[in-house]
Structure formats: C-alpha cells, structure tokens
Image (cartoon, rainbow, N blue to C red):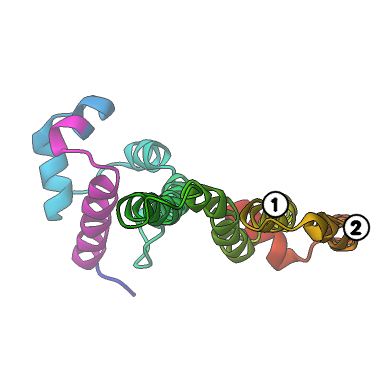
C-alpha cells in the first residue's frame, strides 16, 4: 500500500505535469482556482494535498479525470491529441507545398522557357491528399479517408492531362470511375458494420 508521503509526491508530480502541459504558471492556475500561488506551490512540492473538491476542479480544468491526477500513468487530454493531429497535418501539408513552391521557383529560374512551371502546384494537390490518406488511415477517420481517396483519384489524372498534350488522355477519367464506385461501396459497407468495443473506445479518444 502506498504511504501518505508517497501519495502526496505522486499527486505533486501530476499537478506539475498537467499544469505545464496546459501552459499555465502557478499564478495563472491560482487565479483560476481562486487560491493563492503559495498553495499551488505547496501542492506541487508535496507538502500538502488539495482537497477532493479542488482536485476535481483541477481535473475538469485540464480535461482529465480525477483518477489521472492520482495515478502514476500519465494521460494526454483529448484536446491535446486533437492539436497533435492538426499539427501533424499542417506540417505535412506545409512540406508538400514548400517543395512545390521551390520547384516552381527553380523551374522559373533555370528553365524559363518552360511555360508550365505552375504544374508544380497542380501536382501538389494529389501529393497533399496522399499525405492526408496516410494520416486519416492512421487516425481511423473513415469519412476523411473516403473523401481524400476520391480527391486523389481525380486529381492524379487531371495533373497528367494538364501535363501532356495528348488528346486521348481524358480516357484516364473513365478508368477512375470503377475505383470511385468501389471506394463508395467500401465506405458504405464500413459504415454499416457494427463497431467493436475497442473501435468505440478509439473513436471516443480520437
């Protein structure tokens, strides 16, 4: 059984962890709880414990449970998970469009006779959706995966048609139709399939 001093230290470590995770100073937290920053400091040094009501207020403020504050296992709040996903998507998109911009500028400087340097941005569209396909698959976002797959199917042949002067390339779009139909069927079947307990938990945490 955990001793009282060990328990205080555990709570103290968690209080510091979640406060810093939420980018709050002791003074800012004290203002939100209507307590003095000296009390916050004592809690975080393990010299005393906040009462149950205050612990519940702190947990609600951080978007976690009371158990998270008294457990040795750290939890990342849902809001921070969402921020991490958004950041990953923004970085990925930024990288794709940065490369496209560099390619556009480089082609304009070194191959000024090439009048289609703007195609670098056209190809950036399917490249961006390819990145989003990978991310949405990792995140288990079926609707997003369906939408990005659909965009990818149509923007790839569009980029090819715009790049090459050949009259019959429009036939590529006909080849996309069965892919799109299969993707729609897959999406509808996935929607109808009942979720397992694990999938429900993952969806709730996403």
Q: Earlier in the sequence, mark 2 or mark 1?
A: 1
Q: Nearer the viewer, residue 50 or 156?
A: 156
Magenta range: 4-28
The answer to whether residue 86 shows anywhere in this view is: yes
Instruction: Pick the quarter of the image with the N terminus.
Output: bottom left
Residue lying farthest to the left in this orientation = 38
Which labelled disc corresponds to residue 181? 2
Residue 70: in magenta span: no
Quarter of the figure with residue 38: top left
Q: Is the magenta stretch mostly helix, strand or loop?
A: helix
The answer to whether residue 145 shows anywhere in this view is: no
Circle 2 crowding by C-alpha within 10 Å: few under 14, some 14–19, many from 20: few
Measuring 70% from the left and 52% from the top, which residue is drawn there? 158
111 lies left or right of 158: left
Measuring 11% from the left and 44% from the top, which residue is drawn there? 41
Residue lying farthest to the bottom in this orientation = 1
Measuring 55% from the left and 55% from the top, which residue is drawn there? 123
> Residue 6: horizontal and vertical position, in percent?
22, 67
């Amino acid at each position: 059984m955990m001793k009282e001093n060990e328990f205080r230290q555990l709570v103290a470590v968690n209080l510091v962890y979640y406060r810093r995770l939420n980018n709050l100073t002791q003074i800012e937290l004290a203002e939100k709880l209507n307590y003095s920053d000296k009390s916050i400091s004592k809690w975080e040094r393990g010299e005393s414990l906040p009462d149950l009501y205050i612990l519940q207020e702190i947990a609600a403020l951080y978007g976690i449970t009371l158990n998270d504050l008294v457990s040795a296992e750290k939890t990342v709040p849902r809001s921070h998970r969402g921020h991490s996903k958004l950041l990953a998507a923004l970085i990925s998109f930024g990288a794709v469009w940065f490369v496209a911009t560099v390619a556009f500028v480089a082609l304009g400087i070194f191959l000024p006779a090439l009048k289609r340097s703007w195609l670098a941005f056209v190809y950036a569209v399917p490249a961006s959706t390819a990145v989003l396909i990978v991310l949405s698959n990792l995140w288990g976002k079926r609707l997003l995966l369906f939408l990005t797959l659909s965009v990818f199917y149509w923007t790839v042949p569009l980029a090819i048609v715009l790049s090459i002067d050949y009259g019959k390339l429009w036939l590529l779009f006909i080849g996309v139709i069965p892919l799109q139909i299969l993707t729609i069927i897959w999406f509808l079947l996935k929607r109808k399939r009942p979720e397992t307990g694990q999938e429900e938990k993952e969806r709730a945490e996403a």
